[in-house]
Image (tube, helix red, strand yellow):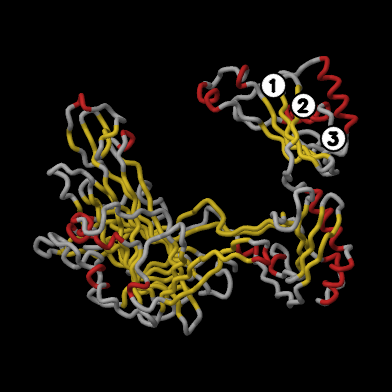
Amino acid sequence: MLSQSDNSPVDGGGLGWGWVRLAALAALLLFSAPSFAAPHPLDALSAPEIRAAVAAIQRAGFTPAARIHSLEVLEPAKADVLAWRAGQPITGPLARRAFAVVREDRRTYEVTIELATGAARRTEVPGVQPGLLPEEYTKARDAVLADARFIQGLTARGIRDRTRLFCWTSTAGTFFNDEARRVVQVQCTQPAGTVVNPYARPITGLTALVDLDGPTVLNVIDAGAVAVPPPAEFDDNAARRSQSRTFQADITDQTVRWGDWSFHWRLDPRVGPIVSLVKFNDRLVLYDGALSEIFVPYMDPDPEWHWRTFLDAGEYGFGRLATKLQRGLDCPDGARFLDAIVAWPDDGTPATLDDAVCIFERDAQEPLWRHAEALTNAQAGRSRFDLVLRLTAELGIYSYTVDWVFGAGGEIGAEVIANGIDAVRAVPQEAGQPGRDDHHGGTVAPGLVAPAHDHFFAFRLDMDVDGPVNDFVNARLVPEVFPGAGGRALWVVQEQVAERERDAAQRISLEAPVQWRVTNAARGTAYVLQPAENIVPLAPPGDPGLARGAFAAQHLWVTPYRADERFAAGPYPNQNANDGLPKWTAANRAIRSTDVVLWYTVGFRHIPAPEDWPVLNARKVRFSLVPFGFFARNPAVQ
């Protein structure tokens, strides 16, 4: 019979129908072909459509032993879907069809069904194995727990009650079988003392290889007994949070406490918000962090434009240009708004920046962690809420929002949201219409071209992971071929402590990935700098424009702490170049076991389009500092 279960729904899409009932339905179809319609040509199959498709599969010549591995709508041609308009009939080339994968007698077939007529066309696909069926999990588990070799391995580990084991079935790849066999691997855990995390107690070193068509246990691999770990359970009662929870931060002057986090903040007139003495449960992570510089080079050779390589923080003062934040737009209703005072650069007069900073809890509308365990029919999870400190500054045409984000799992995020108005130059209207590309930018409106440009944001991160003496570690992911693993090339982690500055300066590479860690060797703890979207300058070395923001040539620099090294482009970037990070690191100073400072640059490339006019929609870039061995377990599990 086709896949059947006492728990399968009879109506609403379940495939637990006996062949007698399907035959009766088929007889009805012979006298009256159904008429199927859907609101949209890409809609999923409805319950009547599924039933009709199953009947069509039966009529296609399969025996009761056949198994349907998948059944889904067969999408129409893309051009036909694009030409369709709401309300038009789903007929002709859009007529509803289904696609199934069926397996019988160790052979796999693809079946195409015309739902309106019930016609089915099947084609054998040799040398393939479709995905696993739910019943196969049980078949494999039962076969393994009855195998004498596997029982012997359990006994050697002191496990005699097999009824309380949790065993899972995994696909085995291509390394343990020929294409004629349908094989899986089975491993088990001893879930005693757990409810939603049985995986914490694996029976290590004991694996079975099973041919599902038997089912037959082909081999049992016993690599030697290892003690079963203790439970690592979740406290579900303490984990859930209501979405209507109230703001729970304690803000005293410029010190903020939220959950296990505490930090100090201030508004610097040049770089904006600085977070300092960032601690989790009184353990220092970050001495201070700030946006150090903003570099915006334009890509137009016109004499009016080629010199435009702005360094917004050092040249204009990012912090003092903070704008008044608006409730309900910039910050949610429950936010706390804080004023800041800066010395105005004209004559040093104190100036109050009203509502320059807001602090709020952000409901991510997603789990921070979750798990649903079929073994015990239990679920647990915790909603994700982050604490955000936000400032927005208006630098002429561009508006930049800087967020410092603190997560319950120990993560620190830095985010920059760019808004604004494109810088444009006028051109004769006959030269282009909206949407037409300009060689050095894009036509955004009749007679207006916005030159292309880059945005780079350099952050200074004075890392103090459990104290000021840290190392910077390049944890390189390197592929190695293992003959014993079927010749697979498996990536392994090769750690190298950077001795000097040149060992650390580098770009993100997809081909040669590296995990960047700041470690406390004495404590065995670390934090990882985790990049996200990013770019690099396209200018060659020595380019006079890049020299203005030469720090952007590398995504990451690492320097020994120096109190006077605060700005990535140097202290005086106006009418200056080749200062800051490239100049300092030319000495190739030692950074082993010292107070290290990370400089990370994140950016995005802007090729203007008509949709960017008359105002830009927000664009966000970010990175994170993530704990790596800083905690003994997930701190977000209470």
Q: Earlier in the sequence, mark 3 or mark 2?
A: 3
Dot placed on the residue nearer the N-terminal end, 2 or 1: 1
Residue 275 at least partly seen: no
Q: Callout 1: helix, strand or loop?
A: loop
> Left or right: where does residue 168 sit relative to residue 163?
left
Q: Element at badge 3?
A: loop
Q: Which mark is residue 52?
A: 2
Q: Work out whether 452 lies above or below 360.
A: above
Question: Residue 145: x and y, percent?
Answer: 86, 63
The residue sitting at 48% across, 58% down in the picture is 246
Q: Residue furthest left?
A: 347
Q: 58 left or right of 473?
A: right
The span from disc 1 to disc 3 (Cα, nearest Å) is: 21 Å
Q: Are marks 2 and 1 in contact (CB under 8 Å)?
A: yes
- Give the CA separation, mark 3 to mark 2: 12 Å
Residue 134: where, in percent of width, then height? Answer: 78, 48
For residue 3, say whether it is visible.
yes
Question: For numbered disc 2, what is the local secondary structure?
Answer: helix
The residue drawn where x is 76% and y is 63% is: 187
| Residue behind mark 3 | 17
- The tag earlier along the polypeptide, 1 or 3, is 3
Q: Please state which amino acid type lies under the numbered disc 1.
A: Phe
| Residue denoted by label 1 | 36
Q: Which quadrant, please, contains the N terminus?
A: top right
The image quadrant where one finds the C terminus is bottom right
Q: Are marks 3 and 2 in contact (CB under 8 Å)?
A: no
